[in-house]
Image: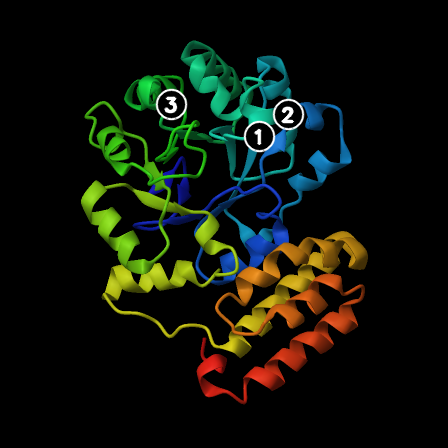
Amino acid sequence: MKIGNIELGDFPLLLAPMEDVSDPPFRSVCKENGADLMFTEFISSEGLIRNAEKSTQKLDIYDSERPIGIQIFGDKIESMKKAASISEAANPEIIDINYGCPVKKVACKGAGAGILLDINKMQKMTSEIVKQVKKPVTVKTRLGWDDNSIKIVEVAERLQDVGIQALTIHGRTRKQMYKGEANWEYIAEVKNNPRINIPIFGNGDINSPEKAKKYKNKYGVDGIMIGRSAIGNPWIFNEIKTYIKENKHIKKPSLNDRIETVKKHLDFSIQWKGEKLGLIEMRRHYTNYFRGMDNFKKHRMKLILSESKNFTLETLNEISNIYSKNKELAEL
């Protein structure tokens, strides 16, 4: 399966662009564990054209994580065109447009999922971006604004007509946010539309190898995008790949596997943002990496309150020593 000339394998697994999560350190551990294509955190077009540090830093990509897409969002066509050019200069494989973010401060300004209320503008903006850059342009979107405005088949056709080379669909409306169950029937309707010839990726609620294989077979998508289920669990990509190909489970990561991955994640986080910010960025990940461990609160608090890399590493080693004495916990 290809996007443009980018070869992604038979059934690629994509890492979703998640704000404050999908940074280079997190992407690195996902890539190591089987992610085929990843995207940056979504980047404000206005921030890029103003050269805001928070936005431009998100353009950082590393050769080890290729292929990768830079995802941009905004409500102004001219700003999005300029942001696409700035992003292309950072040399990703793909320019991705965010038409799916449901957060109020984004969607209610007409960006992200907000543009689903104006499909004509969505088509125009996409067309202008496709003409602006030479890299393949892809889109991530939702089913619609609410249950009364689901026009995802029409959206897919119109975006394909102006030149996008792949489409990822999150199976919820903007109104749903992340609540309720993702509806993949609409995603399948797009994929099975005889007019559609670009890759269609499904997104939403894939949290196990069994579900990934079931949805692959049931809905016929070209690949799956994994979001929240990868947080603290980058192993999910290889777990899904093995289950789809061989119908068997790989061994779950042991406690020491988790700790070693946390250390890699921590090292890269500090390398990327410096010790102080790197430690802060890691705080949101500890609970997820050690989910399911009994009596973990005191250790989590030590990790979260740590102000030095050495103290964090000492705490991780302490966790390893304490829990490894209990075989059942060590094999979580």
Residue at figure coordinates x 54%, y 68% from the top left: 290
Residue 277 rendering spot, x and y as whole percentages: 77, 53
Amino acid type, mark 2: Ser
Q: Secondary structure at mark 2?
A: helix
Amino acid type, mark 3: Asp
- Identify the residue under disc 2: 45
- Identify the residue under disc 3: 146
Query: Local crowd at mark 3 within 10 Å, few (<14), some, or many (≥20)?
Result: some
Position of residue 10 relative to residue 73, above or below, is below
Position of residue 198 relative to residue 129, above or below, is below
Residue 240 shown left or right of residue 275 in the figure: left
Residue 155 rendering spot, x and y as whole percentages: 35, 20
CA–CA distance in space, label 1 to label 2? 6 Å
CA–CA distance in space, label 1 to label 3? 23 Å
Q: 311 or 5: which is nearer to us?
A: 311
CA–CA distance in space, label 2 to label 3? 25 Å
Question: Do we see residue 50 in this rendering?
Answer: yes
Residue at figure coordinates x 59%, y 71% from the top left: 296
Q: Are marks 1 and 3 in contact (CB under 8 Å)?
A: no
Position of residue 44 relative to residue 202, above or below, is above
Residue farthest to the top, as pictured: 120
Q: Secondary structure at mark 1?
A: strand
Q: Secondary structure at mark 3?
A: loop
Residue 24 rendering spot, x and y as whole percentages: 62, 51
Residue at figure coordinates x 62%, y 68% from the top left: 297
Query: Local crowd at mark 1 within 10 Å, few (<14), some, or many (≥20)?
Result: many
Q: Which mark is residue 72?
A: 1
